[in-house]
């Protein structure tokens, strides 16, 4: 791929707040809270220089918490020049301690840290951040060091029994700090604090809305593309669907989508994607029905990585053929999301599974990339999809792996096994939906292993396949827990699968978390 476009949204004229990540698990959460207040936020590393900050022209900066102590050599710090820029800064926990330490305040070790819920008392009116909230209020703390003296010229605005300076501010110096975590739900007035900082200190209004994101992205995509042709691979998943709908809104018939029906999708999924994009959105679609080619390519292959490779390679060949049909397409749409951008650069020690998706196209396919979702989190992408008029069946869809049911059938993949699994999988998901559990479960599906067992049905011996139900809760798929589905729901799934799916005589429930398991079986 030859070039990458800037991320629409990041330079679209919205007020931007930078969140400096000092290594806390909370930086992403802070960025999200800022966005919930309809202000665009971007996560940056502590190594950012004052000049780099200026280049980003932010309305404000938030320093996150972090695991380090400001007293330790090598603890992350910020370029002192950042304090000279006149940009409002809010420090949270470690971030507040760092502001104090770098600006003539004092951070000390307390005898015992302060962890969990604490009652905070406001000094006088609580200043501009805490003003209007109760004089005594619960806050969530997690610190060992404590600020005992705020930065020079800055006033303490609240305290707790173990944090003499639980909050400080000086609106002229534009320095603000809170020892507690306003971004967590356990701090009931936390969002108020964040919003006050955004509106009062930074002067950032609530203009980063889905409608304005769309308008900006549309303009940027038009500028980028001119009158060129653009290709987009639709996988059936949320990200590529929303990216396609957005680009289509911008450039209409200059966009051609390619949907490769591998035959490895869930029941009726292929038809649903085509129906939505072709008929409802009137989008130009090349629908490649390639099930037979995939089954041939997978014939005799048992090893999971070999399967993934075979699927990925065939996908590329088909995509190349489609590209040849679209004369002169020089751009490719990718559904890259913000977490992928944040994580890129982090080195993974071992390849657990070689992920396949449309992004896995080879380098020698010359394309410039259009990545209109590069600055968005997953739930923001769903909201954007709804705003663009995509139906819930697409927008609320659970994640689905590129190689599809190919990695949920253990052993050789055949058309018959796919039909069996599609049927069982549809029952599992339908019952979860009936039980109202669909939204709280990250992913739920059926797996067809390559073993058979003996059973008895209607006084007859059976020798059939088991179906394994997999359902997990997760935040980001990096870790996951098996979902505690009520027994009666499992029972209904089990009896329906056995009664309705030919060749299946047993159902098991996978109670493995990740790690040590993975979400998919292959
Ligand atoms: P694992 O099985 O590694 O899966 O715990 C984590 C998440 O990734 C999805 N997954 C994939 N997604 N291409 C994708 O786009 C792939 O090849 C792929 N393999 C796994 C999986 O469904 C889960 O959400």
Image (cartoon, helix red, strand yellow):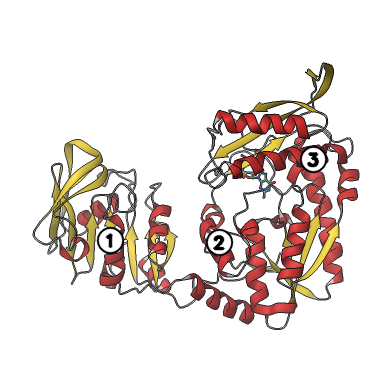
Q: Is residue 63 above or below residue 387?
A: above
Find disc 2 in the rendering and name its residue. 381
Point out the image quarter for the C terminus.
top right
- Cα distance between the residues tagged 1 and 2: 25 Å
Q: Is residue 166 left or right of residue 429?
A: left
Kindly state the secondary structure of the residue where label 2 is placed: helix
Q: Residue 49: give x, y in percent of width and height.
A: 38, 64
Q: Which mark is residue 307?
A: 3
The residue located at (22%, 37%) in the rendering is 113
Locate residue 330 relative to residue 156 in the image: left or right: right
As helix, strand or loop, the secondary structure at mark 3 comes to helix
Q: Between residue 140 and residue 482, name the one nearer to us.
A: 482
Q: Disc 1 designates what residue?
A: 192
- Quarter residue 95 falls in: bottom left
Contact check, label 3 and label 1, Cβ < 8 Å: no
**Label number found at residue 409:** none
Residue in the foreground of this view, choosing between 78 and 446: 446
| Above or below: residue 47 compared with residue 305 | below
**Residue 20: image x %, image y %?**
38, 58
Disc 2 versus disc 3: nearer the observer: 2
Instruction: Calculate the distance from the C-alpha at mark 2 to the C-alpha at mark 3.
Output: 30 Å
| Position in image of residue 15 (x %, y %) | 40, 74
- Mark 2 C-beta closer than 8 Å to ligand 1: no
Closer to the observer: label 3 or label 1? 1
User: Where is residue 68, by image quadrant?
Assistant: top left
Q: Earlier in the sequence, mark 3 or mark 1?
A: 1
Asked whether the viewer can see residue 149, the reply is no
User: Which x, y percent locates residue 389?
Assistant: 61, 69
């Amino acid at each position: 791929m030859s070039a990458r476009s800037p991320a629409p949204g990041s330079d679209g004229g919205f007020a931007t707040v930078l969140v400096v990540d000092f290594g806390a698990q909370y930086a992403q959460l802070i960025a999200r809270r800022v966005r919930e207040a309809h202000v665009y936020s971007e996560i940056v590393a502590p190594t950012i220089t004052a000049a780099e900050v200026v280049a980003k022209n932010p309305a404000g900066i938030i320093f996150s918490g972090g695991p380090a102590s400001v007293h330790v050599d090598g603890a992350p710090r910020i370029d002192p020049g950042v304090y000279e820029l006149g940009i409002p800064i809010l420090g949270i926990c470690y971030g507040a301690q760092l502001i104090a330490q770098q600006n003539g305040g004092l951070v000390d070790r307390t005898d015992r840290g302060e962890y969990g819920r604490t009652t905070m008392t406001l000094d006088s009116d609580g200043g501009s951040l805490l003003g209007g909230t109760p004089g005594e209020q619960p806050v969530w703390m997690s610190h060992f060091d404590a600020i005992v003296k705020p930065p020079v010229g800055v006033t303490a605005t609240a305290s707790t029994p173990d944090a003499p300076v639980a909050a400080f501010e000086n609106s002229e110096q534009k320095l603000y700090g809170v020892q507690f975590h306003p971004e967590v739900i356990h701090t009931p007035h936390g969002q108020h604090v964040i919003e006050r900082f955004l509106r009062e200190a930074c002067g950032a209004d609530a203009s980063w809305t889905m409608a304005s994101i769309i308008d900006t992205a549309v303009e940027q995509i038009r500028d980028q593309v001119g009158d060129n042709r653009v290709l987009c691979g639709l996988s059936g998943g949320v990200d590529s669907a929303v990216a396609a709908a957005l680009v289509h809104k911008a450039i209409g018939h200059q966009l051609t989508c390619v949907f490769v029906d591998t035959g490895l999708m869930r029941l009726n999924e292929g038809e649903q994607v085509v129906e939505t994009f072709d008929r409802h959105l009137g989008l130009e679609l090349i629908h490649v029905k390639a099930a037979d080619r995939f089954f041939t390519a997978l014939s005799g292959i048992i090893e999971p990585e070999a399967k993934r490779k075979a699927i990925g390679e065939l996908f590329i060949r088909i995509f190349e053929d489609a590209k040849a049909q679209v004369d002169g397409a020089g751009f490719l749409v990718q559904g890259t999301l913000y977490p992928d951008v944040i994580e890129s650069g982090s080195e993974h020690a071992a390849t657990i599974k070689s992920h396949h998706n449309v992004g896995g196209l080879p380098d020698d396919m010359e394309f410039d990339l259009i990545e209109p979702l590069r600055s968005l989190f997953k739930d923001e992408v769903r909201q954007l999809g709804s705003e663009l008029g995509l139906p819930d069946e697409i927008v609320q869809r659970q994640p689905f792996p590129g190689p599809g049911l190919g990695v949920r059938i253990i052993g050789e993949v055949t058309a018959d096994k796919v039909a069996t699994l599609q049927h069982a999988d549809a029952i599992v998901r339908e019952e979860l939906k009936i039980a109202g559990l669909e939204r709280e479960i990250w992913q739920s599906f059926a797996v067809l292993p390559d073993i058979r067992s003996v059973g008895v049905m209607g006084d007859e011996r059976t020798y059939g396949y088991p179906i394994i139900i997999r359902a997990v809760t997760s935040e980001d798929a990096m870790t996951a827990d098996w979902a505690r589905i009520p027994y009666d729901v499992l029972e209904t799934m089990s009896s329906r699968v056995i009664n309705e799916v030919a060749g299946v005589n047993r159902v098991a429930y996978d109670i493995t978390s990740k790690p040590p398991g993975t979400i998919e079986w292959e």
